[in-house]
Amino acid sequence: MGNYLIVSDVTADLHMDVIERYDVKMIPMMFMLDDQEYQQDADFKVFHELDFYNKLRAGSTGSTSQITPYAYIEYFTPLLEAGHDILYIVFSSGLSNTYQSSQIALQELKEKFPERKIYFIDSLAASAGEGFLVYYACLNREKGMTIEENATWIEENRLHIAHWVAVDDLHHLARGGRVSDATAIVGSALSIKPILHVDDEGHLLNVAKARGRKKSLNKLVEKMAQTAINPKDQLIMISHADALEDATYVANKIREEMGVKEILISDIGPVIGSHAGPGTIALFFFASTRS
């Protein structure tokens, strides 16, 4: 029934406790820092050794690349040869061509291993929003869901994972084309903080703004209060880009205002952090709607 592997990308920014508890397989991804290439693994070892966000604050530039079909085939072949079925929850197709690469690899893997069950599912999610789906997929497997049932559950529930993001540094959004250079300069001077969310197509959109850091963090809590489904009874995830104090502030405010009992805080790794920038706070929860 539940004898299959659950796999995701390091873009899921999943807490190591969850990875180890449920034996989640995490596909590493590459990132560049000042023209030097590095690999982000699930344990974030390189991320911490590099002091990644302090380098970004000092003017270093981070960039990323998608996983290639060849890399997928190389990663999954030994797992399939060992007799495992695979449920792979993939980084949003709205943010990267990684999912398209996975589909090319999937066709070849299915032809090579016709006896195996292989599901590659577009999460339409990012950071701990992707991790959120992975966590619940693990719970579903533990409850005895078959791989087919779990794949269906993910597809039916992925658009109920709300993503609300407060970005501290507009210049990183400008480099990624999310805002104009002029907006970044003026907004930074006026302490304008953008509020972003991931829509139903998996795109990251700039949908609101707040004047000042604290107001932007409070805005995340307001958005959760508007759409969260039974917040007291669900796990809430918060990821942060070297901003643990602010992540803790959001967590405490959610506990106080909504009675939430279980909150998991994790780091945003270099692959997501290269685009979001230091100081980013992202909040994830089950919601009636993403917007």
Image (cartoon, rainbow, N blue to C red):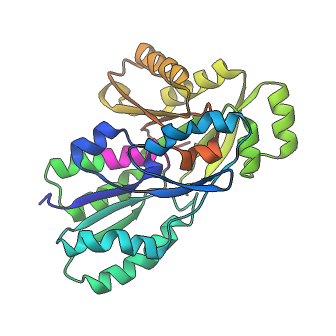
**Horizontally, is 183 left or right of 18 in the view?**
right
Relative to 240, say whether 106 is above or below.
below
Quadrant where the N terminus sits is bottom left
- The residue positioned farthest toward the top in the image shown: 256
Report x, y in % for residue 109: 33, 79
Which of the two residues, 285 or 87, is positioned nearer the viewer here?
A: 87
Q: Is residue 117 visible?
A: no
Quadrant where the C terminus sits is top right
Region in magenta: 126-135
Q: Is residue 183 visible?
A: yes
Relative to 116, say whether 25 is above or below.
above
The image quarter containing residue 128 is: top left
Which of the two residues, 242 or 226, is positioned nearer the viewer here?
A: 242
Is residue 25 highlighted in magenta? Answer: no
Report x, y in % for residue 252: 45, 16
Chief secondary structure of the magenta portion: helix
**Horizontally, is 158 left or right of 216 in the view?**
left
Q: Residue at x 25, y 82 (%)?
A: 113
Report x, y in % for residue 15: 37, 38
Q: Residue at x 27, y 66 (%)?
A: 86
**Horizontally, is 135 left or right of 104 in the view?**
left
**Horizontally, is 35 left or right of 179 in the view?**
left
Q: How many marks?
A: 0
Q: Residue at x 29, y 37 (%)?
A: 17
Report x, y in % for residue 269: 51, 43
Q: Residue at x 67, y 39 (%)?
A: 56
The image quarter containing residue 90 is: bottom left
Which of the two residues, 79 or 203, is positioned nearer the viewer here?
A: 79
Which of the two residues, 1 or 115, is positioned nearer the viewer here?
A: 115
